[in-house]
Image (cartoon, helix red, strand yellow):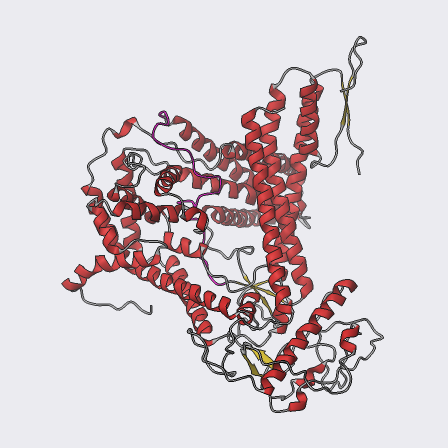
């Protein structure tokens, strides 16, 4: 796309801006209706509704569209969309009241789409889901060895299985190319959408205003979205256990520390302050790590495998050795967690059994 | 043994776990299939028209019609095929010997072609120089170019036909097939790794594809950078927030959309705190500064855990405070598969690389990944089972056989990882002596 060209505002531009924004949106979303349909939806034209139901269905489905789900009847899609929106906490009741046959409600559906767009980077997320993977993520290395020197991109150096396969199978290669080009078109549209979206939001304001106010809104409250029925309970229990363990460990160390603290000279008071600051910063960084959305490179996210000899430090990617280290740490932690949980269960069950006299428990022989 | 609701939930969880294992297996098998197919002789393409001679562009439309492959092309194809076949044999031998493939530097000037003692089929070929078998001209895809003297290190192995590659353009007919003498390797059977480049051939991706792929990478990079750049999007971000608020107030509801995302964040917090605690507890303080630091850290972690717990309890109260009307028009929930969260936690894809330099590294990494995934699943199932089974056991009063059976089963699942059972003897008063 290059730099944004700075132009003096031109009335003709303003008139074009909205259609272009909507056109970009239509090109970047999968299965999107034409820009004209979007605008008709504002005025509740009946033909807009089915197209928007289908779009919402496609957008909300967790899996890429396959034959099975795409062939669902419009009515089934409409009902699915309603419940999916409800799970995410969609606030407007009018949507629920739309007929299931999918024949009406263009404006409400437009609002629903805008709501989803406002909450997160929807086009980017959809494109990420359907992204054409050119590299290998599952470990394979023969092809990597044999094809060294074959890739025009020097930072990669060798071909992936997918790329080698495309050479072996020209028809498959053509399909891959087509998919790649389609994705490129959608990516370009997404970039354009990002540049132009402000005018879309201004327009959506007018759409919202065009709706009649919800009748007696307070009599109906949708269920608040829950990540899972017992997830919060489980988490609460975990946090309590964790806090308990930390308390024990900290108290023990504090007691041990108090016992010897007198023995330290005056210089340690200055050092103490420095340590307190350092630890506070450490913990603040830790807290930031979970409060902010992860934009950091995830070591175990999808990454293209590249075989390389060059031990260039600070190179373009993550080294297998580092990833292995991280995984080992995680493995150790998980093993500890599992053992701890099992221990907890043993105690609990022993307690329950103990409460009932007359039972003799013979534990299995320790391996 | 279990109430219907409970068992329904458990069955669903277990089914999910099994499904994800099956999916992983399927992916691995698929990947193996594709790789094996690539290592065999490539079957000719269905289309009779071969690609144009090497070096020329491949169009999106049907490739321009054929000139029959020249003898040189055939030779190169032959080379590649045999190289790949050899690789398969080597690999088979390797997997029997259980050795990993290591790439070593080639000593320059090494004259002999050392190969592992190959299976009989290859011996029959290794008699002097041979004329390439004339295969009937087939519609073959010719994506490669002859290897020029490319700069850069050779990949290497312990002495092999690297000489084939040395300046061997397609011009040297006798570069066709080098003698493959079997030099018995007294030393360990160091297997070969080699590159197509060394064999005098290179595969090259079609031009159109290369262009599309690089455009793709550049577009993703632009999109990623847009995400992080706030200045341009500030106005749009404000507009979006205002729109959302307007939607919410128009419906007259309290804002509740954040709670699911918050719980997710708190879960992440919990595991990060635990990880950090473990690091502190296993570290060995060398002097008093480290000891003190460790103490402060633990106390700080304790405080953070308390804060998270407090926040979670607040959220739980918030939920229970909202009055629910009878379900009425809202239909049944969507399928179990997780819905994409409105909160937008998925990062935008960006080209990231994972670099490795030996098969061993890769094997270790793959094995670890699998182990961690398994442990993750085990821990999750443990928690789920605990949440379901322990309350049941503590609530049920009757000390009958069902309760004991449940207890035993629970112990097995929860404490022994489903591996071993304990024995429970019921010591009844004299009138009824019957072990459960």
Residue B308: x and y in percent read 49, 37
Give left or right: position of A113 versus A296. left
- Per the rendered image, the range of residues in magenta is B325-351
Q: Quadrant of residue A149?
A: bottom right
Q: Quadrant of residue B152?
A: bottom right
Residue B213: x and y in percent read 45, 69
Nearest the eye: B137 or B216: B137
Judged from this view, the residue extending furthest toward the top is B431
- Is A316 situated above or below A238? below
Residue B295 visible somewhere in the drawing: no
Q: Name the residue rendered at 58%, 33% in the picture.
A: B10
Judged from this view, the residue extending furthest toward the right is B186
Give left or right: position of A91 versus A286. left
Is residue A29 part of the magenta span, yes or no?
A: no
Magenta: main secondary structure equals loop
Residue B37: x and y in percent read 62, 66
Q: Name the residue rendered at 23%, 54% in the picture.
A: A36
Residue A143: x and y in percent read 62, 69
Q: Quadrant of residue A317?
A: bottom right
Quadrant where the N terminus of chain B is found in the figure = top right
Q: Name the residue rendered at 75%, 34% in the picture.
A: B420
Nearest the eye: B228 or B388: B388
Judged from this view, the residue extending furthest toward the left is A11
Quadrant where the C terminus of chain B is found in the figure = top right
Residue B305 visible somewhere in the drawing: yes
Give left or right: position of A180 versus B26. left
Nearest the eye: A164 or B291: A164
Is residue B335 part of the magenta span, yes or no?
A: yes
């Amino acid at each position: 796309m290059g730099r944004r060209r700075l132009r003096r505002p031109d009335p003709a531009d303003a008139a074009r801006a909205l259609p272009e924004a909507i056109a970009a949106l239509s090109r970047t979303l999968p299965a999107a209706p034409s820009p004209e349909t979007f605008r008709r939806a504002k005025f509740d034209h009946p033909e807009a509704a089915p197209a928007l139901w289908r779009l919402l269905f496609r957008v909300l489905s967790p899996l890429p569209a396959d034959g099975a789900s795409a062939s669902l009847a419009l009515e089934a899609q409409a009902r699915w969309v309603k419940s999916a929106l409800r799970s995410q906490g969609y606030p407007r009741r009018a949507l629920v009241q739309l007929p299931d046959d999918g024949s009406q409600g263009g404006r409400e559906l437009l609002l629903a789409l805008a709501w989803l767009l406002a909450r997160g980077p929807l086009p980017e997320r959809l494109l990420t889901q359907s992204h054409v993977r050119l590299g290998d993520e599952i470990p394979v290395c023969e092809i990597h060895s044999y094809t060294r020197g074959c890739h025009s991109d020097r930072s990669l150096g060798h071909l992936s299985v997918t790329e080698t396969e495309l050479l072996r199978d020209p028809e498959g290669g053509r399909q891959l190319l087509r998919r790649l080009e389609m994705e490129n078109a959608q990516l370009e549209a997404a970039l354009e959408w990002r540049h132009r979206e402000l005018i879309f939001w201004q327009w959506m304001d007018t759409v919202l205003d065009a709706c009649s106010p919800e009748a007696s809104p307070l009599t109906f409250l949708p269920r608040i979205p829950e990540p899972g029925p017992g997830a919060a309970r489980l988490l609460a229990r975990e946090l309590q256990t964790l806090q308990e363990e930390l308390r024990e460990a900290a108290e023990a160390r504090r007691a041990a520390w108090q016992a010897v603290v007198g023995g330290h000279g005056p210089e340690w008071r200055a050092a103490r302050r420095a340590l307190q600051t350092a630890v506070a910063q450490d913990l603040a960084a830790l807290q930031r790590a979970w409060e902010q959305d992860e934009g950091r490179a995830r070591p175990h996210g999808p990454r293209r495998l590249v075989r390389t000899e060059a031990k260039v430090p600070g190179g373009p990617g993550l080294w297998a050795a580092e990833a292995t280290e991280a995984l080992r740490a995680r493995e150790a932690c998980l093993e500890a967690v599992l053992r701890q949980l099992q221990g907890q269960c043993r105690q609990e069950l022993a307690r329950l059994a103990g409460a009932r006299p007359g039972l003799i428990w013979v534990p299995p022989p320790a391996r | 043994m279990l109430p219907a609701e409970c068992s329904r939930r458990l069955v669903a969880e277990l089914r999910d776990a099994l499904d994800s294992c099956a999916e992983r297996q399927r992916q691995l098998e698929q990947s193996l299939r594709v790789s094996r197919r690539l290592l065999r002789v490539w079957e000719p393409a269905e289309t009779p028209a071969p690609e144009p001679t090497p070096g020329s562009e491949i169009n999106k439309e049907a490739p321009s019609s054929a000139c029959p492959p020249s003898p040189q092309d055939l030779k190169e194809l032959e080379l590649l095929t045999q190289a790949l076949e050899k690789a398969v044999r080597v690999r088979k031998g390797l997997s029997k010997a259980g050795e990993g493939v290591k790439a070593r530097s080639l000593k320059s000037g090494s004259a002999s072609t050392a190969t592992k003692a190959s299976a009989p089929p290859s011996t029959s070929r290794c008699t002097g120089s041979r004329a390439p078998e004339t295969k009937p001209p087939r519609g073959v895809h010719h994506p490669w170019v002859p290897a020029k003297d490319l700069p850069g290190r050779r990949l290497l192995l312990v002495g092999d036909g690297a000489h084939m590659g040395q300046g061997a353009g397609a011009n040297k007919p006798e570069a066709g097939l080098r003698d493959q003498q079997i030099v018995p390797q007294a030393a360990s059977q160091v297997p070969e790794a080699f590159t197509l480049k060394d064999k005098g051939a290179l595969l090259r991706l079609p031009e159109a594809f290369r262009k599309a792929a690089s455009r793709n990478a550049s577009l993703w990079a632009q999109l990623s950078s847009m995400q992080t750049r706030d200045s341009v999007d500030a106005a749009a971000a404000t507009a979006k927030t205002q729109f959302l608020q307007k939607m919410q107030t128009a419906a007259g509801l309290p804002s509740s959309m954040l709670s699911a995302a918050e719980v997710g964040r708190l879960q992440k917090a919990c595991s990060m705190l635990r990880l950090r605690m473990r690091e502190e507890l296993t570290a060995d303080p060398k002097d008093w500064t480290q000891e003190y630091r460790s103490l402060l850290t633990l106390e700080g972690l304790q405080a953070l855990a308390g804060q998270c717990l407090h926040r979670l309890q607040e959220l739980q109260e918030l939920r229970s405070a909202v009055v629910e009307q009878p379900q009425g028009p809202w239909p049944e929930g969507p399928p179990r598969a997780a819905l994409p969260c409105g909160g937008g936690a998925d990062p935008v894809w960006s080209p990231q690389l994972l670099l490795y330099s030996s098969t061993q590294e890769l094997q270790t990494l793959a094995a670890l990944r699998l182990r961690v995934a398994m442990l993750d699943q085990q821990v999750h199932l443990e928690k789920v089972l605990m949440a379901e089974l322990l309350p049941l056991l503590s609530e049920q009063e009757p000390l009958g056989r069902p309760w004991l059976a449940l207890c035993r089963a629970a112990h097995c699942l929860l404490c022994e990882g489903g591996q071993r059972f304990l024995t429970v003897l019921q010591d009844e008063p004299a009138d009824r002596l019957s072990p459960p």
